Image (cartoon, rainbow, N blue to C red):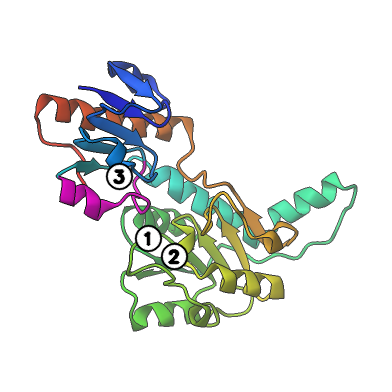
C-alpha cells in the first residue's frame, strides 16, 4: 500500500515499512501523523490514519468517520514514561530543584525552603492507564491518592483537599477548560499543579494569573497553543517547564513506532487493527 508520513519515526520497526514517502504524497492510502491535522481533500485515496500518539485531539475524528477512514493511536506503551515525568515534575516543583540549579549556576547559594512530596495528598484528574501508573508511583512516596474520573462535585472536593494535582484527562469537548478559573481558585495556598496531558484541559490564562500571584506552583509539560508558551511564565521561579516530552524516551518512542507499524501492516493485510480509535 502507498504510505505517507509527516516525519520518519524512531526505532527499528520503521524499517519494516516499504514504499513510505516522508512528506506530501497525493496518492497515499495510509497517512502516519503525530497528532496533526489531516489534509483530507488532498488525499482522496486515504483509507487509514495511523497516529503516533495516544492523543488525537488535533485529528478530525468526525471527518474520518464520514469518509470511512480508519484511525489508530498508540495507547499503553507510553504510560510509564508519562507517569515518570509527572512524578519528576512534582518533585522538581515541590523541592524547587530548577530554582536551586539556576541559583548555583548564577554563583549564588540561597537558603531555599521547599515542600515535601512524601505524605502529600495527590488528586489525579483522569484515573485511566496513565493516571493509574502515577498512583502506583505515588504509593512509593506514601502519598494519599484521590482519583477523579468525572467533572462533577468529586473534582471540586478533590481540588480543595489536594496538596498536589496531576492532570491526565484526554482533551475533548467535555474536558476542554475542565480546570477552570473557578476550580483553580479552589486549590489551597502552596498547592502544586502538574499537567502532562493537554494544555487546553486547563484555563491557561487563569493558570498564568495564579502562578504570577505566587499562590501555587506548577510543573507543566503541555500548553494550550504549542509551541507557544505564555511569556509571563518564562521568568517565574515557581513553575517548571518542559517541551511536551512526557513520552520522549528512546524506549517509549521505539515502542510507539512498533504500534504504528503493527497497525499499518495489519491494515495492509486486511486484518483487525491492534489499536483502533475507529
Outermost right residue = 107
Q: Disc number at residue 11?
A: none
Q: How many marks?
A: 3
Q: Which residue is drawn at the image coordinates 53% and 56% (left, top)? A: 225
Which structural element holds mark 1?
loop
Q: Position of residue 28 (x, y in %)?
A: 26, 28
Q: CA distance from mark 1 to mark 3?
A: 15 Å
Q: Does the segment drawn in magenta span residue 47?
A: no
Q: Position of residue 125 (x, y in %)?
A: 40, 67
* Residue corresponding to mark 2: 201
Decide if residue 139 is on the left or right side of residue 149: right
Badge 1 crowding class, 10 Å Cα cut-off, few under 14, some 14 to 19, many 20 or more, is: many
* Residue corresponding to mark 1: 171
Q: Which residues are magenta?
A: 53-67
Tags 1 and 2 touching, CB below 8 Å: yes
Please say if 54 is above or below 213. above
Amino acid at each position: 500500500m502507498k504510505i505517507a508520513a509527516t516525519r520518519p519515526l524512531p526505532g527499528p520497526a520503521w524499517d519494516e515499512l516499504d514504499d513510505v514517502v516522508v512528506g506530501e504524497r497525493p496518492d497515499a492510502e495510509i497517512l502516519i501523523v503525530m497528532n496533526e491535522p489531516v489534509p483530507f481533500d488532498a488525499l482522496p485515496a486515504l483509507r487509514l490514519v495511523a497516529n503516533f500518539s495516544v492523543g488525537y485531539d488535533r485529528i478530525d475524528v468526525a471527518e474520518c468517520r464520514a469518509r470511512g477512514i480508519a484511525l489508530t493511536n498508540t495507547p499503553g506503551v507510553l504510560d510509564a514514561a508519562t507517569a515518570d515525568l509527572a512524578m519528576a515534575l512534582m518533585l522538581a516543583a515541590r523541592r524547587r530543584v530548577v530554582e536551586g540549579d539556576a541559583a548555583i549556576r548564577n554563583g549564588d547559594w540561597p537558603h531555599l525552603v521547599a515542600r515535601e512530596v512524601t505524605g502529600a495528598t495527590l488528586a489525579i484528574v483522569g484515573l485511566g492507564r496513565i493516571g493509574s501508573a502515577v498512583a502506583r508511583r505515588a504509593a512509593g512516596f506514601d502519598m494519599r491518592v484521590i482519583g477523579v474520573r468525572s467533572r462533577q462535585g468529586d473534582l471540586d472536593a478533590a481540588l480543595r483537599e489536594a496538596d498536589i494535582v496531576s492532570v491526565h484527562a484526554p482533551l475533548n469537548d467535555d474536558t476542554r477548560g475542565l480546570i477552570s478559573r473557578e476550580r483553580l481558585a479552589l486549590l489551597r495556598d502552596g498547592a502544586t499543579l502538574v499537567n502532562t496531558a493537554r494544555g487546553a484541559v486547563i484555563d491557561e490564562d487563569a493558570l498564568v494569573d495564579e502562578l504570577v500571584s505566587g499562590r501555587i506552583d506548577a510543573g507543566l509539560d503541555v500548553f494550550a497553543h504549542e509551541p507557544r508558551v505564555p511569556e509571563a511564565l518564562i521568568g517565574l521561579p515557581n513553575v517548571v517547564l518542559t517541551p511536551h516530552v512526557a513520552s520522549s524516551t528512546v524506549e517509549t518512542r521505539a515502542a510507539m513506532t512498533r504500534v504504528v507499524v503493527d497497525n499499518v501492516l495489519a491494515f495492509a493485510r486486511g486484518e483487525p487493527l491492534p489499536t483502533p480509535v475507529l
